[in-house]
Amino acid sequence: MGTSDDHALAAGNAQLIGELFQNCSIAIGVRDVRGHDIVHVEDNPRAAAFFHKTPEQLRGVSEAELGVPRDHIDRSIARLRVARATGKPGIVEFSLESPHGRRTLSGTVVALEHAPEERYAFVLEDVTELRALQSSMERAERLAAVGTLSASISHEIANPAMYAELHLRFAMERASAEGVSPAILDDLKTALQGVEQVTSLLQDLRSLSMDPPQASEVGEIEPALQTVVGLVRPALESTELHVRSAPVPAVRVSRGRLIQVLLNLVRNAKDAVGGRQGNIWIDVSQATPETVQIDVADDGPGLAAELRARLFEPFVTTKPMGTGLGLYVSRLLVTRAGGTIEALDREGGGLRMRVVLPTVAGESSLR
């Protein structure tokens, strides 16, 4: 075959490769490492679409200019150079902001040995949903482990905690009646708060391994509300508690689980107010013929939007000694009963936690 034929064949192959690159449904890109950055040499349309640009718009643009975090770029460069040193494909993963939020891209890379620059070919895929699913599974596994562990040890801890709480209350009553110094009363109060925190944590841990509610479970709002008010009012100090409860039907959740949810919300409101001369409101109403609505509101500082978005995730808390399980468990109990729970801004400042629960058809707790 003559030289002209060789050139024609090479040109034909180059054109074919170019067409495959441009029209391939797989995201493919070529990148150079220049200094401390990664620069786009060429992207096919599928790869450019990840960045919401055309191949022409990406050509010569660095990852830093595209908003890829500095630490992601540094890790990618290190992995690219490992791929070059070993001659084997490598994996890089990075995130970037897009019009649809932060996306995670993963790429298989190979070093192009005979390129004039430190050049690499990438095959990219969007793994945002996959990583979110993996993260959810990891959290679920941790919670399952916590639930299993708590089921085995909570009884052993709960009994002595109950005895300690009971005797601390007796000791406070006796100390107050016998005129013991305020400093000793404060110490006893602090100890009691610590024991109450342990008790609350044990209740949350037990709930993680609790079976879903049965369809036959029924709870009446008013008795549960009276129990919660009786438990929290002595600890409110200068905070005012305002309760407004309209006659409502029974709901599809047991009294015990209802108390747990309400107690958690009221205690959170108390912590938000912070012991100052603030206010907590509990409002119970029948939102629709099929639902009962319970609002627990406070005039504390409220919550930032970024924290509110994660408020019901496990292990997320604003409290120095909190576990981040209380609201997670509350949502678990409410949603298992077919209800909803959400955090809202309170008009005038503060936070409003709203619980909506399904009613028991044809039954009323006050008839």
Image (spheres, helix red, strand yellow):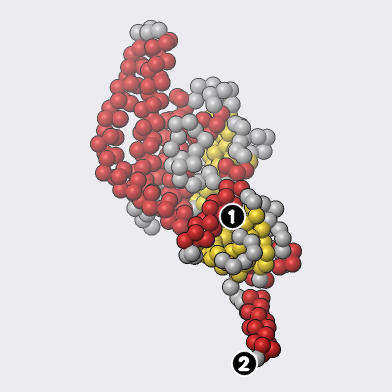
Mark 2, residues whose alpha carbon is within 10 Å: few (<14), some, or many (≥20)?
A: few
| Label 1 element class | strand
- Mark 2, residue position: 1
Is residue 275 visible to the viewer in this orientation of the structure? yes
Check the image and name the residue furthest to the right.
57
Mark 1 and mark 2 lie on one chain; the one further toward the N terminus is 2
Tag of residue 95: 1
Q: Amino acid at mark 1?
A: Ser
Residue at image coords 35%, 38%: 202
* Observer-nearest of 105 and 38: 38
Looking at the image, the residue that sits furthest to the front is 2
Between 112 and 251, which is closer to the camera in this rendering? 112
* Quadrant location of the N terminus in the rendered image: bottom right
Left or right? Give the position of 81 relative to 55: left
Q: Which of the 4 image quarters holds residue 285?
A: top right
On screen, residue 209 versus residue 46, left or right, reads left
Q: Which mark is residue 189?
A: none
Picture quarter containing residue 190? top left
Spot occupied by residue 7 in the image (x, y as percentages of width and height)? 67, 85
Q: What residue appears at the point 66 percent right and 58 percent down from the top-left corner? A: 39
Q: Distance from label 1 to label 2 (Cα)?
A: 50 Å
Q: Position of residue 159 (x, y in %)?
A: 26, 33
The reply to whether discs 1 and 2 touch (Cβ–Cβ < 8 Å) is no
**Residue 167, above or below 162:** above
Instruction: Give me the residue at 30% from left, 30% from top.
Output: 161
Q: Nearer the viewer, residue 359 or 61?
A: 61
Up/down of 168 relative to 338, above or below = above
Which x, y percent locates residue 73?
Answer: 59, 52
Residue at the image position 36 percent from the left and 42 percent from the top? 205
